[in-house]
Amino acid sequence: MKRANKFVIPPNWKLMFNDLDLNIEEVLAYAKLPKGLFAQEKVQLSPSQYFQLWHGVDLAAHGRDMPLEFAKVMSLEFFDVPIYAAICTPNLNAAAKRLQEYKPLIGPMVLDIDTNDEYTELLISCYGFEAPLPLCLNLSELIFFTQLTRLATRQNIAPLHVELPALPDNLDQYESYFGCPITLGSNTSIRFSSKDANTPFLTRNQLMLKCFDSELQKQLSETVGKQNVVDHVKKVLLDALPQGQSSIDYVARELAMSKRTLQRKLSHENLTFQELLQEVRQSLAKDYLIKSELPVSEISFLLGFQECNSFIRAYTSWNGLSPAQQREQLM
């Protein structure tokens, strides 16, 4: 499966934030992302940063139901090229296949499609993030597919069924929007009847689709076609941290390049070595805490921290919980 470690956030998001009456600086502050992020010419996020951004959206909403608000304001103006390509296809089945192919250009989400004579089911999952997905994101993804279908067909199409790993407080309002039951389950999924999934899109445009596909295939190849320096650094760190090695000098030597060259290559990915080190440590820490019974002191050692207290402080700053509190919450 094609995956990317960086995602470009299109300028259209600023329009979306505006229409949702969200303060961008407040969203970024809650997400713990640079306040000048959207002032950059090209906004790129790692998988973990992508989910941080959605967490920031949820907090900046101050109790408002952002997914339902999104349904009210969603328009073609919000869409970037991969989604424009999807609405140029003949129907939802074809659009879903396009989005499945181009998901690496959109975000760290995986789209699985189950199609038969009775229904088409879309199942959404993620990578690069160990914690449960923000409910705001899960609901927005399912609303996106519903609203996309309604916009493209100009019909009030209702799915047959929606499943979520956590239910919203105002369940009745969401069931009213979707027009179907929402059940609690292990997946984030939405099911449409075969008839609705094959209803023609009035936005179908084969000429535009051909133009979009050519450019998108090029972007896809550039995005996931080769392993970049970020992947190499992560691999070295995974081996080096249990040995107590976490310096940029060590990693640069292992990659047979100078420290300055490594810094330059990472800057091209809009990353610093410290940011990447933190991302690797954060991911490993959660794995150790969730999947093992190792004491915190040993986890600290395996992550290359000189002192256990340094690890506890770092973990608390990343997650708002100490390692012990995180473990207790998961038990």
Image (tube, rainbow, N blue to C red):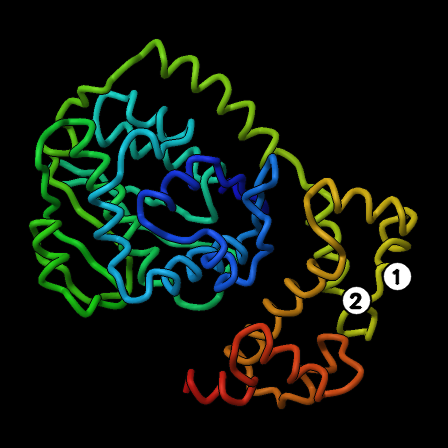
Residue type (three-letter) at the residue carrying disc 1: Tyr
The residue indicated by pointer 1 is 250
Q: Which residue is mark 2?
A: 240
Q: Position of residue 181 (x, y in %)?
A: 9, 58
Query: How crowded is the residue under tag 1: few (<14 C-alpha within 10 Å), some, or many (20+)?
Result: some
User: Is the residue marked by circle 2 packed among few (<14), some (14-19), or many (20+) residues within 10 Å?
Assistant: some
Q: Quadrant of the C terminus?
A: bottom left
Specify the label residue 123 is tagged with: none
Between 60 and 260, the residue placed more toward the observer is: 60
Q: Residue at x 19, y 70 (%)?
A: 169
Residue at image location 56% in from the left, 23% down from the top? 218
Q: In the displayed structure, would residue 291 be above or below residue 66? A: below
Across and down, in percent, residue 4 comes to 56, 43
In the picture provided, is 248 more to the left or to the right than 19?
right
Label whose residue precedes the other's in the sequence (1 or 2): 2
* Residue 28 shows in the view: yes
Looking at the image, is mark 1 or mark 2 nearer the viewer?
Answer: 1
Percent x, y of residue 212: 43, 19
Q: SS for tag 1?
A: helix
Residue 133 appears in view? no
Q: Is residue 325 left or right of residue 111?
A: right
Dot 2 lies on which element? Answer: helix
Inspect the image, locate mark 2, and give the three-letter code of the amino acid beneath it.
Answer: Ala
Q: Is residue 302 left or right of residue 11?
A: right
